Image (cartoon, rainbow, N blue to C red):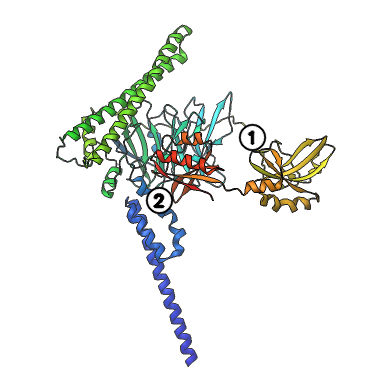
Amino acid sequence: MRKRYLNTSLITLVLLAICQIAGSQTTVDRLIAKADSARLAYDFILADELCRQVTELDSTAVDKIEDLSIMSKNGQKMMEFCSRPVVVTRRTFPLKDFLLFYPLEDNSWRESPNQLDPNGGDGLAQAVFYPEGAKDIYYSAADDEGIRNIYRTSLADSMWTAPTLINEQLTSSSDEIYPMLSPDGESMYFASKGLYGVGGYDLYVSKWNPETGDWDVPVNMGFPYSSPYDDFLFMNTEDGRYSIFASNRSCSKDSVCVYVIEYDGMPVREAILDVKDLRALSALFPARDPGRIEKSNEDDTGEEAKRYMEKMKEVRSLRDSVSNFNKGLEALRSEYSSASDDRKAALAEEILAKELQLPSINDSLQKAVKGLQALEMEFLANGIVLDVKKLQERADNEVARRPSSVRFTRHSYGPAPSLAIREPEKKFDYSFMILPEGRFAENNKLPNGIIYQIQMFTQSRKATIADIKGLSPVFERQSGGKYICSVGLFRTYADALANLNKVKKQGFRTAEIRAYKDGEQISVNNARKLENERLYTVVFYPVNGQSLPDGAMEAFRKAGTDVAKSVENGSVVFKAGPFHDKGEAEELMRALKALDAGDCKISDE
């Protein structure tokens, strides 16, 4: 009987433990659901706190809430950089064909699946934008793992280039969709759910960098363009008056809202830390919508308010001037392309004169924007608090409302693309391999830095495929009438050593390690000393958590160093180096700190 009693007690204890675990798990799941609801309601502080409570209750749940925690922290940072666009109108369309209502040329969209996007859409990404006569196509397509990336193909003579990924900065571990260029081709807008954001698809813009000939680090467009929901397909209209994008933040799953806002190329950013204000801003009520945020009857007639309003009007006026000037310049360039030879000379002179004026006009606008920001800082320093939101709304009312030229007309899909695309060039793989048939390196030149190779043999004649016994990549060089064959490009001695016996087992029993610095042979001992030298890296954390400030790239260029982008805890981090001299690293750090746009540190890891 005692033994039976003990067994019953043990079972009871086990059942109690199971109930406790189940109860704890229920609490954890409930907290996670509550945290996600808080994120969707723009309460990122509460969401972050609930994530912390989850980890306190169950340390094994860290992986479960990692993404949610990162998005909550991102949201808090993004609340410090919000803009207030003027919403002209919004319309709700069925998800299945919303993009056909965009004010673009008829037949511009080519329905997926198609030649460029053979795997088809993902519910949101339904088509490729390919207007008639386009010579560059930027589009989203799924790779072999089903992840959607942005590709580009260009018309060269009668053939289209092999599609290539845009670059590393615009490619995440998740999906990127709907790339759209600005009318001037200098900005690319797209949506991503794998870059720095707050959940779902966020909107990003990347600027074309003529110096590097590539797209710069993309920047999250921030609230209210991005949201915890899906925001996508952002574009600017050809006339420069409006921007348009779609979102499912305020509609059913089978629909999307399309928002038309007044174009603002240089939005004034402000912090919106009140959750209710952020929700109201992100609702994007049109200016004439009865549901728009009610304006206060209180009239700010103080001297400071007047100064602010005047400066704001100056900025807006200059923006209109720059926009109109650019349109006039584009019209002249367009006329030049089809003008007669006699007319071209006069047009070229007129275009040159206007291009010389453009920097001065842009400089005036930049000065006005800085003046507005300086005024805000002056008020802040003197303890003067203005209701910027109300002043901006008043300015909106004072701006003469032009009727929207955007007309929502349903267009048709164009025919499926049929492009003559060149076969992609296969890039040689320089990683060490043992293959059924060996391969010689395409280029015998060694990369800069410390490189180790495994020297296989020296002989009086040129080596053949049979001689290298399946090894790849094999480098062959001549010295003193002899042919020397070595295999591999190893960045560390440890890697070379780990593969030495593999080479010997292939029949090269006298194989040995050789070392090179910037292509010149040095002793292995010296190479290992250089390899183990302490190197310094400057780590820069931008204040907005995502983009480099003005002047940063110039500081990097002066330091003569490479810059790499990475993500730590949901924020973008830039790392410059390596530096052998700590003084050089400190000099760069001082230059970055002088920009007052983020934190810096020197790492010697």
Task: Please report contact status of discs 1 and 2: CB closer than 8 Å, yes or no.
Answer: no
SS at badge 2: helix
- CA gap between label 1 and label 2 equals 39 Å
Where does the image place residue 388, in percent across and percent down from the top left? 24, 39
Q: Amino acid at mark 1?
A: Glu
Q: Is residue 130 above or below residue 57?
A: above
Q: Is residue 115 visible?
A: no
The answer to whether residue 324 is seen in the rendering is yes
**At 44% from the left edge and 49% from the top edge, which residue is drawn?**
570
Along the line of sight, which residue is nearer the eye, 434 or 574?
574
Q: Residue at x 29, y 31 (%)?
A: 371
Number of callouts: 2
Along the horizontal axis of the image, is 466 left or right of 265?
A: right
Residue, far front: 583
Identify the disc placed on residue 108.
none
> Does 99 sit above or below residue 523?
above
Image coords of residue 463 (percent x, y): 81, 39
- Residue reaching furthest bottom? 1
Amino acid on which the number 2 mark rests in the picture: Met
Of callouts 1 and 2, the N-terminal one? 2
Q: In the image, is 299 to the left or to the right of 462?
A: left
In the image as oriented, which residue stretches furthest toward the top?
A: 342
Task: Decide: is 23 above or below 177.
Answer: below
* Percent of width and height locating residue 29: 39, 63
Nearer-the-camera pick, 437 or 577: 577
In the rendered image, which residue does mark 2 sit on?
71
Disc number for residue 425: 1
Q: Residue at x 49, y 24 (%)?
A: 133
User: Residue 74, percent across and down?
Assistant: 39, 48
Q: Nearer the viewer, residue 9 or 382?
A: 382
Label 1 residue SS: loop
Drawn side of residue 554 relative to residue 290, left or right? right
